[in-house]
Image (cartoon, helix red, strand yellow):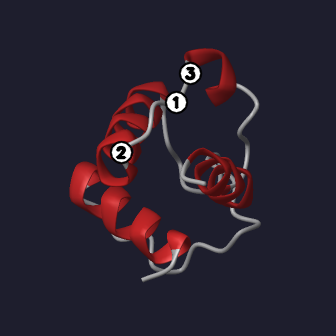
Amino acid sequence: MDTLDMLRKAIKKELGRDFGDISLNTTFEDMALDSLDVVQMVMAIEEAFDIEIDDDDVDGLKTIGDLVEYIEEKIK
């Protein structure tokens, strides 16, 4: 399973919504995520990928592509 598929699965599990149509260019705004959703999503990603995402880094992540790239850098 690639990073994007794992990300979709983690988000769906945590938020209870299916984002199967998200692409690397999809923004969190496109997904209609509020600040609580983003916090929950970050926690789910940290658990799914066994990484820690710094709060300061979250502000710089605007698209799913940014998030995938960030995750892949962290798991190297």
- Residues at circles 1 and 3 in contact by the CB criterion of under 8 Å: yes
For the N terminus, the quadrant is: bottom left
Q: Secondary structure at mark 1?
A: loop
Residue to which mark 3 is pinned: 54
Question: For the residue marked with disc 3, what is the amino acid?
Answer: Asp
Residue to which mark 1 is pinned: 53
Residue 74 drawn above or below residue 52? below
User: For the residues marked 3 and 2, what is the alpha-carbon distance in whole angstroms?
Assistant: 13 Å
Q: Nearer the viewer, residue 57 or 12?
A: 57
Tell me which corner region of the image, top left, top right, bottom left or bottom right, holds residue 8: bottom left
Residues packed near mark 1 inside 10 Å, few (<14), some (14 to 19) or many (20 plus): some
Q: Nearer the viewer, residue 74 or 63?
A: 74
Q: Which residue is located at x 45 percent, y 63 percent?
A: 7
Q: Which residue is located at x 23 percent, y 59 percent?
A: 13
Residues packed near mark 2 inside 10 Å, few (<14), some (14 to 19) or many (20 plus): few
Tell me which corner region of the image, top left, top right, bottom left or bottom right, holds residue 5: bottom left
Residue to which mark 2 is pinned: 50
Q: Position of residue 76 (x, y in %)?
A: 60, 54
Q: Nearer the viewer, residue 53 or 14?
A: 53
